[in-house]
Amino acid sequence: MIKKFIRRILGAKDKEVDPTQPAILGPKEHGIDPQLVSPNALKVTQTLQDAGFKAFVVGGAVRDLLLGVKPKDFDIATNATPEQVKRLFRRAFIIGKRFQIVHVMLGQEQLEVTTFRGASSDGSPKDEHGRVLRDNTFGEQHEDAVRRDFTINAMYYDPATQTVLDYHGGIADIKGKTLRMIGAPEARYREDPVRLLRVVRFAAKLDFAIEPATSAPIKVMAPLINNVPAARVFDEMLKLLMSGQALACLQQLRKQGLHHGLLPLLDVVLEQPLGEKFVTLALANTDARIKQGKPVSPGFLFAALLWHQVLEKWTAYQTAGEYPIPALHLAADDVLNAQTEKLALQRKIASDMRDIWAMQPRFERRIGKSPYKLLEHLRLRAGYDFLLLRCASGEIDSEIGEWWTDFIAADGGGREALLNKKAKAAEGAAAKKRPRRRNGRSKPQDGSGTANGA
Ligand code: ATP
Ligand code: MG
């Protein structure tokens, strides 16, 4: 009842503004710094406009420009068809099934050029839950604006005239730090449940409040995400994790009840007390790297998110009598199989994760040629960073991480010295505690190795 009432009021308010007529803002009103616009984006809009088409920077880039943030990439919207766009650029590729877009490559930069989308998805084919399966219709700019998700993502910027076209009150919402769905939120979530994740990501990333009508249906509609193809969920999850606000995003997801049954990965991650410290550290680390402009590998990220699940299974396999190394591989298989099915982990990412995990017990073998072999490993850096996270979370003794920091930095003589020192320390410890023990690799009794005794 209340929801209906609110919607009726909002609907009435919507009708007051003509959604086909944008508010047009000049440079003094919007205050965008033209220096923040990539020269390649300018080249693309210019080329399209010179050929007689309309062309604008659109979506997240305009939002970021209005917030005074340098956009990480630029999307362009045009009335040219994909074929017409492709003909204007030397390196341009038409991609996409659900809706065709063109990737224009200029130097290292990839720009996504999208033709204005047509009006309504009412006639488009849908699955039994109302999710739109295909809609490849082109349309007018105002129709394209209605199809976008949030008011702040539905503005168009023309770099040539330095004007912003705002169809849905996006400027006001940027000022009010508000995330507002265009249209009726429930229907918009139903036609594309990925928007449930997007709302959370933007709220956390921009530190914006979710407007009540936009946030109200989230909890109830959360299960709809299960019908979305795993690859799309994965893409959106990756954006969320690489947003520079991954921790805040996950906290929001939890707050909105979106982690439950919604994403198998998050169920695991957020509900294991032991792993929480590790995951928190890993995400804080990732956020810091992204803010410093350093690269982050998805493989590392997912390896971290799932590590404590691997640890649990690793222990179980050893308890059941497996040797440590095969037990670790079996545990990795289990975790990867479960997640690949549900999360569409790409093969390359899964293999990076396995590499990082498999390296961990090898860091603990600090005798003979083992450490030298590990130094040659292609993924040493990732494995070592992972080791440091394990130390920082208290899972293993920080001495191991420090030793490896020294070993990696040392020259030939220094490395021998470190190995000798380690061998002497091990001998000393063995003599003190277990005078007759021969095998230094057996389960440590002092808590200095992993809980799994690898
Ligand atoms: P980011 O800065 O994180 O890339 P973004 O807003 O650019 O944020 P994209 O996923 O790159 O997000 O999408 C570009 C634009 O396309 C959005 O700003 C929005 O206008 C539109 N869009 C993307 N996904 C959806 C969706 N699921 N439903 C409606 N519109 C969408
Ligand atoms: Mg974008």
Image (cartoon, rainbow, N blue to C red):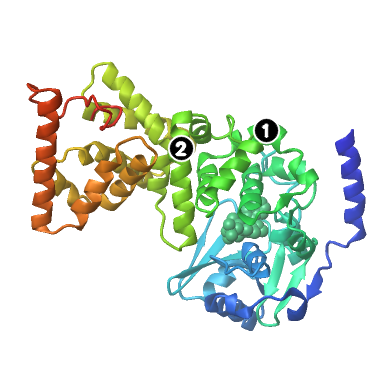
Q: Is residue 413 left or right of residue 290?
A: left
C-alpha gap between disc 2 and disc 1:
40 Å
Q: Is residue 408 left or right of residue 239?
A: left
**What is the crowding at mark 1: few (fewer than 14 residues within 10 Å), some, or many (at least 20)?**
few
Residue 79 visible at all: no
Residue 277 got which mark? 2
Of the 4 image quadrants, the one containing the C terminus is top left
Which residue, given by chain and number where applicable, does mark 1 sit on? 128
Pair 2/1: label in front? 2
Three-letter amino acid code of the residue under disc 1:
Glu
Where residue 410 sits, quadrant-wise, is: bottom left
For image coordinates 70% across by 46% down, the residue present is 124
Picture quadrant of ligand 1:
bottom right
Q: Nearer the viewer, residue 281 or 312?
A: 281
Of the 4 image quadrants, the one containing the N terminus is top right
Q: Residue furthest front?
A: 432
Q: Position of residue 115 (x, y in %)?
A: 64, 64
Where residue 73 sits, quadrant-wise, is: bottom right
